[in-house]
Image (cartoon, rainbow, N blue to C red):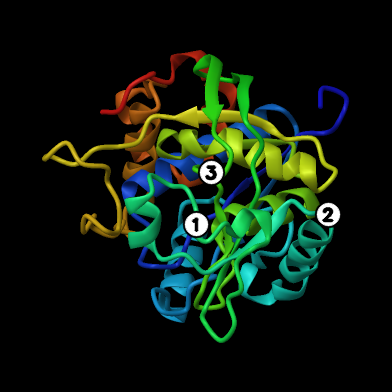
Amino acid sequence: MADTPYRGRFAPSPTGPLHFGSLVTALASYLEARVHQGQWLVRIEDLDPLRESPEATDSILHSLRCHGLIPDAPVRFQSRRHGAYQNAIDQLLSDGIAYRCACSRKQLKEHHGRHPEHCRQGQSAPGNRLFAIRFALQDEICHWQDELLGAQTQQVTAEVDDPVILRKEGFYAYQLAVVVDDIDQGITDVVRGSDLLDMTAQQQQIYRALGATPPNWLHIPVILNEDGQKLSKQNHAPALDDRQPAGNLAAALAALGQKPPANLSQQPVENILAWAIRHWQREAIPLTSR
């Protein structure tokens, strides 16, 4: 994608307010886009109404604005994109690279990821039972170059690793929606946490199945709490204090290895971002979580 203008994105799930770990990812993706004279988009991945709330969405967007992280296009909401995801599923089913699966988690675990009802071969008859739809992966040893971590290799095992793309509850799954939207929005570069690294090879196969070239990947280390756990909403990470965006941004730059000057946190937000763009050094990002 060297000849294509840079287009990046930040895509949070609205399961709670923005926390420091999310700010670090948002800032890294924003700075990468700005340094490459590209566009930066925001997408709300609101596909699970059982875990999300409008209040969380409003809070996340408010926090981004307070920190000067303004997207270059209107915010996209995945909850308004069901038709696009269903069209992709219909295409994959028609092409024979997706299948209906009524197996339970217990059944799959007991059979080491294999489908006892032979769903992948089309022999399962879900009938009135709930079923998921899975993408049929191909056996592959996948190689790619991560923009930070360097050469990467992942092994993909057909059937065992087949990801769900439509859940039994009727919700479209992350693995499908993220690819469909990245393709539709022309995303060339993805900056995200290294906790998503293991999904990359699977997602690359979905990109290719939908006739698209995968983006460039840059996986940054996740931020850890005092107990060594990933800073996340599930681990009760505290919400960002939007009343002190300058301090938050300076701390995020430090977490990204950028060594901001001590007085930077006393500057207006726009000055901090301008400094960060001028001094951004991707190679200074630490390779391991902190």
What residue is at 82 percent from the left and 22 percent from the top?
Answer: 2
Specify the amino acid type for callout 1.
Pro
Residue 94 vs residue 222: left or right? Answer: right
Residue identifier under label 3: 270
Which secondary structure, mark 3? Answer: helix
| Residue 192 picture location, percent across and down | 51, 39
- State how many labels appear: 3
Q: Position of residue 220 (x, y in %)?
A: 45, 30
Q: CA distance from mark 2 to mark 1?
A: 31 Å
Question: In terms of depth relative to the viewer, which is nearer, 11 or 100?
Answer: 100
Tell me if mark 3 has few (under 14), some (14-19) or many (20+) residues whose alpha carbon lies within 10 angstroms of its own.
few
Mark earlier in primary sequence (2, 3) = 2
Q: Which residue is mark 1?
A: 12
The residue that mark 2 highlights is 95
Vertically, is 62 above or below 244? Answer: below
Q: Amino acid at mark 3?
A: Glu
Q: Label 2, secondary structure: give it.
A: loop
Q: Looking at the picture, how far across and down is residue 132, in whole percent?
A: 56, 68
Tell me, yes or no, whether the two marked residues, 3 and 1, touch with CB atoms within 8 Å: no
> What is the quadrant of the C terminus in the image?
top left
At x 68%, y 50%, the residue is: 179
Residue type (three-letter) at the residue carrying disc 2: Asp
